[in-house]
């Protein structure tokens, strides 16, 4: 399984259109509950390409905190060990528009892939 390493995580400002959890966003004000912020992620894939983008998500402690069968994890290499909910996928078409089904490993992730920008 591939590795993704977090290079940075940040919650973004407010404003914009209504987005549900796991959809892409530009500002926190776009995200509807249960999402708690528009989280920007930057990460390094196993093939040394960088990925980045933002999506509506929420802080979590366990998978039970994540809606729609999501997984609660911190990306490997995240210095803050920020646990967020990620949509689980097995194929590209299972991810919201703008997110890719990405093989990864991190603290708390099982054998599933997750939707990342």
Image (cartoon, rainbow, N blue to C red):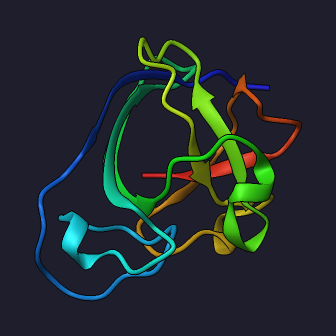
Q: Quadrant of residue 19?
A: bottom left
Q: Quadrant of residue 101?
A: bottom right
Pick the front one: 1 or 67 = 67
Residue at 18% across, 65% down: 27
Left/right placement of residue 56 relative to residue 101 reads left
What is the x, y in percent for residue 98?
41, 67
Residue at 61% across, 53% down: 86
- Number of marks in picture: 0
Residue at 34% across, 75% down: 31
What is the x, y in percent for residue 53?
31, 49
Residue at 51% across, 73% down: 34
Vertical side of 49 occupied by 10: above or below: below
Vertical side of 78 occupied by 102: above or below: below
Instruction: Classify the position of the N terminus by image quarter.
Output: top right
What is the x, y in percent for residue 103?
69, 38
Vertical side of 76 occupied by 115: above or below: below
What is the x, y in percent for residue 106?
68, 24
Left/right placement of residue 114 relative to residue 79 reads right
Q: Residue furthest bottom?
A: 18
Pick the front one: 64 or 47 = 64
Vertical side of 82 occupied by 70: above or below: below
């Amino acid at each position: 399984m591939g590795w993704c390493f977090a290079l940075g995580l940040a919650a973004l400002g407010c404003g914009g259109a209504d987005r549900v959890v796991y959809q892409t966003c530009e500002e926190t004000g776009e995200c509807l509950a249960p999402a708690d912020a528009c989280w920007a992620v930057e990460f390094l894939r196993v093939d040394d390409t960088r990925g980045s983008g933002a999506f509506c998500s929420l802080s979590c402690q366990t998978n039970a905190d994540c809606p729609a069968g999501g997984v609660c994890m911190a990306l490997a290499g995240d210095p803050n060990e920020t646990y967020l909910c990620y949509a689980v996928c097995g194929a590209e078409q299972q991810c919201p528009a703008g997110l890719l089904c990405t093989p990864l490993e991190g603290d708390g992730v099982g054998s599933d892939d997750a939707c990342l920008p």
